[in-house]
Every structure is written in C-alpha cells, then in structure tokens.
Image (tube, rainbow, N blue to C red):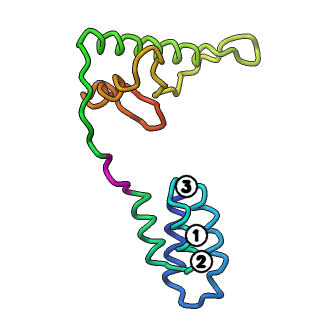
Amino acid sequence: MNLTQKLRQLHADIAKSGDGFKIVDAWAMVDRLMGRLPVDQARLKRVVSEKDADGLGAMLDELEAPPAPKAGPAATFPAAEMDAAMRAFKKRLKVMILSDESRLGGRYTTGGRTSKIDAIEPPPDFDRKIWKALAASGQLIDTGGGFYSLPKK
C-alpha cells in the first residue's frame, strides 16, 4: 500500500465515521502523512484542525491529479545541438548501465546481473531546457525529479 492509498483509506474511515472521538488517531495519521507530501502546509493545518473531511478529499484529489503546468514558450534549439545532446544522453545511459552490470560480487567476479537502470539525470553539459525540449518532442521521457529515460520501443 502506497502513501496515497493509505491516505484514501483514512479519508474513507473519517468520512464513514460520525463520531469524532473514534477518528482522532486517523486525523493524527493524516496530519503526519500529509506533512511529508508537497501540499500547502497552511491549508493542511486548517483542514486537520477543523477536521474537514471534504477539504481532505479535495487535497487528495489535487495530490493525485495535479493541475497541468502552464505552457510557456517552447525553447527551440538547433537540430545539431539536439542531436549532440541525445548522443551524450545515450552514451551516459550506456555507461551507467554497464557500470551497474559489472559490479563486483562477493567472490571477486561480476554477478552477471542485468541492470535495472531505466532513467538517469542527463549530462550537465547541456542546458536544462534542451532536455525539456527533447521530452516535448518525444525523444525522451521525463520521469520526474530531473530524471529522463528513453522511450520504450
């Protein structure tokens, strides 16, 4: 069970129960768990202090389906620079995967394992906007947190 599922379960328990004393622990758990998430902390404190189940539901809805980012002007880069960035990305990804696969095991030999790396931070040699442009064009997938991956074939 992940964090949002647990919060949904707590919200259902809170909404179902009419007795405020029985759900005190549920509200304390909601306050503790939601405090770890990227939500408006002042709004969270208000919802928890007022024990507003509808407000909690709205916050969970916003957390699960965040509003779409405002589209700004798309940065344009020369094709040669985008190709160079893609080559650098693919090379760095290949090196990271090979490095992960060739780790030494406990018996001074490689494990023969396959790598589970599928996304990496792009090389810092290029502007961050070029990685967003490559993701917008479909050549890369933005996996979040500054990590990108190649599209599945």
Q: Quadrant of residue 128?
A: top left
Q: Which residue is mark 1?
A: 45
Q: Quadrant of residue 21?
A: bottom right
Q: Quadrant of the N terminus?
A: bottom right
Q: Amino acid at mark 3?
A: Leu
Q: Which residue is mark 2?
A: 49
Give residue 37's mark: 3
Q: Quadrant of the C terminus?
A: top left
Give residue 86's mark: none
Relative to residue 83, is residue 146 depicted above or below?
Answer: below
**Which span of residues is magenta-colored?**
65-69
Give the secondary structure at mark 3: loop
Q: Residue furthest right?
A: 107
How many residues crowd around disc 1 within 10 Å: few (fewer than 14), some, or many (20 or more)?
A: some
x%, y% of residue 104?
69, 14
Give the tally of numbered discs.
Answer: 3
Residue 82 in view (yes/no): yes
Q: Amino acid at mark 1?
A: Lys
Q: Is residue 127 magenta?
A: no
How many residues crowd around disc 3 within 10 Å: few (fewer than 14), some, or many (20 or more)?
A: few
Work out how far the residue at label 2 is from the one at label 1, CA to CA, in angstroms: 6 Å
Residue at image location 23% in from the left, 13% down from the top? 79
Residue at image location 55% in from the left, 61% down from the top? 41
Residue 153 in view (yes/no): no
Relative to the observer, which residue lies in front, 2 or 40? 40
Give the secondary structure at mark 2: helix
Work out how far the residue at label 2 is from the one at label 3, CA to CA, in angstroms: 18 Å
Relative to residue 125, is residue 64 depicted above or below?
Answer: below
Residue 79 shown left or right of residue 93 in the figure:
left
Q: Quadrant of residue 110?
A: top right
